[in-house]
Image: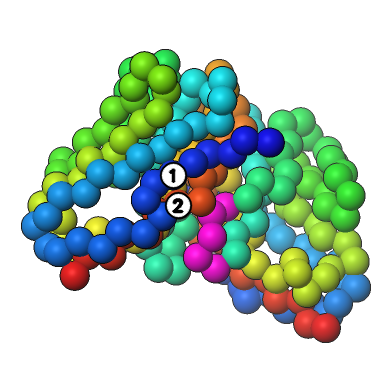
Amino acid sequence: QKEVEQNSGPLSVPEGAIASLNCTYSDRGSQSFFWYRQYSGKSPELIMFIYSNGDKEDGRFTAQLNKASQYVSLLIRDSQPSDSATYLCAVNTPLTEGGSEKLVFGKGTKLTVNP
Amino acid sequence: AAGVIQSPRHLIKEKRETATLKCYPIPRHDTVYWYQQGPGQDPQFLISFYEKMQSDKGSIPDRFSAQQFSDYHSELNMSSLELGDSALYFCASSYGGLGDTQYFGPGTRLTVL
């Protein structure tokens, strides 16, 4: 089982709607959670990061974290066609002896916002 | 603001050739990570360096090696290239080395013919 799970989609929403992207992770020791947006053929672009349980808002984006349920989500309000991309959930792995914390990515959810 | 720089942006090689990819982290970032992303796949962690020392190793083939230099730039050396090595290779950098936010470079698209 992959350590970070996302619905691959595609997720299709109309312009102006709320897009909800979900992610679960398997390692309870994970501390940092990231959402990246990736356009086709481009590099991942950081959208949000969250460390604490609860909600974190930045403009039209809200990240939600529930460590007890091992669940992190991203809400995009007032979705725009330019939001159409693949959204990658990334979770840091806990520090292990001799290692560093690295990101483990989910397979991404492809979002399409229809005009 | 300065971002991560990768070169070359595109590279075409024949099977069994070698390739060297370069990464210049954001100024003052001391940690570099390399990821490989195949078509339709999520980025897979290859290797990372913190303060010029290898800090972790992922699914990097033995044919690949990497290092971080005194100016913190990093190079990924790939030998005996195979068709399956064709992918996007991303470098990311962070400050502090341990779980801090990673910022990705534009990537190098490697095509092996």
Q: Predominant secondary structure in magenta?
A: loop
Residue type of the residue flagged with mark 2: Gly
Residue ID at (14%, 64%) = B14
Callout 2 secondary element:
loop
Image quarter of residue A67 = top right
Residue ID at (82%, 60%) = A76
Report in which chain the residue with disc 2 lies: B
Q: Nearer the viewer, residue B34 or A31?
A: B34
Q: Which residue is mark 2?
A: B107
Task: Judge left or right: residue A45 versus residue B108.
Answer: right
User: Share a chain, discs 1 and 2?
Assistant: yes
Q: Nearer the viewer, residue B23 or A111?
A: B23
Residue ID at (57%, 52%) = A44
Disc 1 to disc 2, C-alpha distance: 6 Å
Task: Judge left or right: residue B109 versus residue B15.
Answer: right
User: Can residue B107 be seen here?
Assistant: yes
Q: Which residue is mark 1?
A: B6
Magenta residues span: A40-44
Residue B56 is covered by the magenta coloring: no
The image position of residue B15, as x and y in percent, is 12, 63
First of labels 1, 2 by sequence position: 1
